[in-house]
Structure formats: structure tokens, C-alpha cells
Image (spheres, helix red, strand yellow):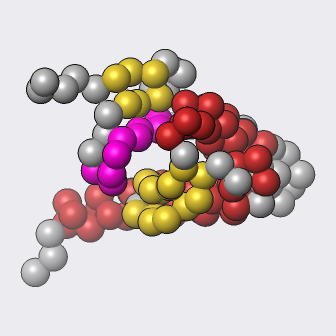
Amino acid sequence: HYDIDAVIRVGNNFGIQSGGHDLHSLAHIYHENTESLISRAQPGLEMHDNLMMETHEKDIEQTAFMIKQGWESVARNTILADGSPLGWEIPVEIKWGPSFGESTHTLTTGGKIVKENSND
């Protein structure tokens, strides 16, 4: 037996998820080929629409803004087969902290740095 609702949901999401992954791959390639970025942050682990990177703490805020701007630029300016730019406006949020899964700061999609609440 098939769950028809699940089949429809998967069918509807497939194109979006596929396009999203293609864009994520292009942004990752852009990052690795941009000396000012790769010298500051080295990709370590990719999962779905997340990319874990390592960087020096002293450079982290500036690096976060550079990554955000670069990835948003890829979405806007990737050239399609017909020669036109993709033109997507995508939300890019950057989180960082002492380890993967332990965020202490967020660069929001709106460009503000928010410090996470601590239980101190």
C-alpha cells in the first residue's frame, strides 16, 4: 500500500529540494574558489542545506558576513543556460560557536548578529 499523501508531498518537494541542493553545491564551489573566503574558513562537513566550517575566532564576524554575502550573490548571479541571471533572493543565516551543534551567535538573514542566551 502507498501513502498517496506522502507520494504527492515527495513529488511536490523534489524539484525544490533538487534545485536547492544544486544552489548549495554552486555556493560551496564558489567558496572554495574564492581565496579571501577559503583562506578564512575551511569547509568541513556538509549536511543537507548546512555546511560546517572552521575559522579563527578573531576573524569570525567578518568571515560570517563574507560567507553570507557570497552565497546570496551566487543565488542572484548564477547564469542560466539562456544567459539570464538566476535572480533568486535566498535567506542565508550563519551560526557559530565552540563546536558543531553548539551555537553561541547567529548572523540573521536580515544581517544582524544575535548572541544566544546562556544559562550562566
Determine if residue 77 is in view.
Answer: yes
Residue 98 place in picture, x, y as percent: 34, 46
Residue 24 place in picture, x, y as percent: 57, 57
Determine if residue 14 is in view.
Answer: no
Side of 87 relative to 104 (left or right): right
On the rendered image, what quadrant is the N terminus found in? bottom left
Q: Residue at x 40, y 63 (%)?
A: 47
Residue 64 picture quarter: top right
Q: Quick check: 58 above or below 117?
A: below
Residue 99 place in picture, x, y as percent: 33, 51
Q: Nearer the viewer, residue 5 or 116?
A: 116
Side of 39 relative to 56 (left or right): right
Instruction: Specify the farthest residue to the right.
Output: 83
How would you classify the magenta stretch by its main secondary structure? loop
Q: Tell me where the magenta segment starts and ends, as one range.
A: 93-101
Instruction: Specify the farthest residue to the bottom.
Output: 1
Q: Quick check: 64 above or below 28?
A: above
Q: Quick check: 99 above or below 73?
A: below
Q: Residue at x 21, y 63 (%)?
A: 6
Residue 40 place in picture, x, y as percent: 65, 49
Q: Quick check: 64 above or below 27?
A: above
Q: Residue at x 89, y 51 (%)?
A: 83
Residue 23 picture quarter: bottom right
On the rendered image, what quadrant is the C terminus found in? top left
Q: Residue at x 31, y 40 (%)?
A: 103
